Image (cartoon, rainbow, N blue to C red):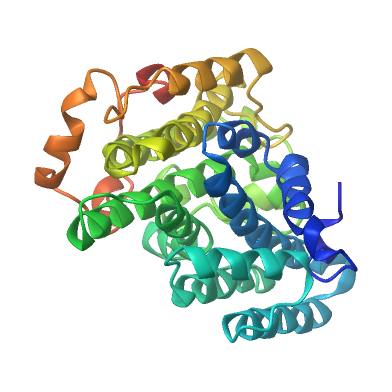
């Protein structure tokens, strides 16, 4: 497995570029790696290139505690310059050569690639978010962008209007998946001095950012479980709002998209089974559960995106779509949701 933080510019023969990106995916994205085999080969190769591009940027920033934020900021600037060179037709290294190939074949807007890098760079600053609105802005930068890129690769039949609807669903799904990451990695992030949980939401349950950063016993605090139950419910509401968008994708991409969405959503159930203690440990989905997700997705009939949703493709254009995740999950802290494990809905 290549070290993804230095994987963009190694000496790799152009004929090995696709394999290089595939190895990054295989080493870092278990859910996506398995789900990607539900894609046709060309779309899978393009999706791997996009993942590798995003992963290298993310790993650069995660190296900041060791390399120092100034050095990492310079590396990220170099990475952004390499992106601009790629957009100008001068790609360097396996990741950017594969990305250039994607740009030649799919209408991925350069703006969304730049938005991803700007979002990732936010982690070079102290990670604190006062409100849910502020956290959504971050999630849109680092994850909604990925959903938008994938939507362009997966394809949306039906013309520009349908594509815009699919992109809005995809961006909401990105927020759901990033929020899941945050809830899974609370302790790991705290040990890096990061707290992504909105201060306003914590305060509503009598907690603070300092509790998250410095209390190893936080999971035993009687206020922690209600807070996490609320946050998990918010994430589920986002998944449920985003799922109909899967039916708007090209039929040959729907199974992969569903497997990614429900596979990630199943992490929420794993968090619950830990008693919401993601301070001391990381919630993981077992091999049997991952296999079930893939089996359910593989059985999906084109046009279905959730149980009994053979009607979703026709109904989706009339859905009350939310332009951002704010309207889906609410901007405040008072909303609570039915505790269902979304993977069972697939």
x, y (%) of residue 271? 57, 27
In the rendered view, does 167 fall on the left or right side of 37?
Answer: left
Q: Nearer the viewer, residue 65 or 159?
A: 159
x, y (%) of residue 179? 49, 46
Instruction: Determine whether 97 is above or below 261 in the image.
Output: below
Instruction: Determine whether 160 is above or below 28 in the image.
Output: below
x, y (%) of residue 189? 69, 51
Residue depicted at x 61% and y 50%:
45
Q: Nearer the viewer, residue 262 or 186?
A: 262
Quarter in which the C terminus is drawn: top left
**Residue farthest along the front direction in this orientation:** 15
In the rendered view, does 188 fall on the left or right side of 311?
Answer: right
Instruction: Determine whether 174 is above or below 115 in the image.
Output: above
x, y (%) of residue 298? 46, 21
Residue 335 seen in the current view? no
Q: Quadrant of residue 194?
A: bottom right
Q: Nearer the viewer, residue 191 or 301?
A: 301
Q: Nearer the viewer, residue 233 or 106?
A: 106
In the rendered view, does 146 fall on the left or right side of 335?
Answer: right
């Amino acid at each position: 497995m290549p070290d993804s933080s230095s994987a963009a510019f190694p000496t790799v023969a152009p004929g090995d570029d696709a394999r290089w990106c595939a190895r990054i995916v295989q080493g870092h994205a278990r859910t996506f790696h398995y789900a990607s085999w539900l894609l046709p080969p060309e779309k899978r190769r393009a999706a791997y290139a996009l993942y590798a591009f995003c992963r290298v940027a993310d790993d650069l920033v995660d190296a900041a505690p060791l390399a120092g934020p100034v050095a990492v900021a310079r590396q990220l600037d170099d990475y952004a310059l390499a992106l601009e060179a790629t957009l100008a037709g001068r790609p360097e290294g396996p990741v950017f050569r594969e990305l250039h190939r994607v740009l030649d074949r799919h209408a991925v807007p350069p703006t969304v690639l730049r938005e991803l890098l700007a979002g990732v760079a936010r982690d070079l600053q102290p990670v604190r978010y006062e409100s849910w609105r502020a956290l959504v802005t971050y999630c849109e930068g680092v994850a909604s962008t990925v959903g938008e890129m994938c939507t362009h690769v997966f394809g949306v039949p039906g013309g520009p209007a349908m594509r815009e609807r699919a992109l809005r669903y995809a961006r909401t799904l990105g927020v759901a998946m990033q929020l899941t990451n945050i809830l899974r990695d609370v302790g790991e992030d705290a040990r890096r001095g990061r707290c992504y949980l909105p201060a306003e939401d914590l305060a509503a349950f009598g907690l603070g950012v300092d509790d998250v950063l410095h209390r190893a016993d936080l999971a035993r605090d009687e206020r922690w479980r209600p807070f996490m139950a609320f946050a998990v419910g918010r994430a589920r509401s986002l998944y449920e709002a985003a799922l109909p968008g899967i039916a708007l994708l090209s039929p040959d991409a729907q199974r992969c998209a569903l497997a990614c969405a429900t596979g990630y959503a199943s992490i929420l159930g794993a968090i619950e089974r830990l008693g919401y203690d993601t301070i001391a440990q990381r919630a993981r989905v077992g091999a049997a559960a991952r296999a079930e997700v893939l089996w359910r997705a593989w059985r999906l009939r084109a046009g279905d995106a959730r149980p009994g949703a053979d009607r979703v493709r026709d109904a989706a254009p009339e859905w009350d779509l939310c332009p951002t995740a704010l309207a889906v999950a609410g901007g405040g802290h008072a909303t609570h949701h039915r505790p269902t494990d979304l993977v069972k809905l697939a």
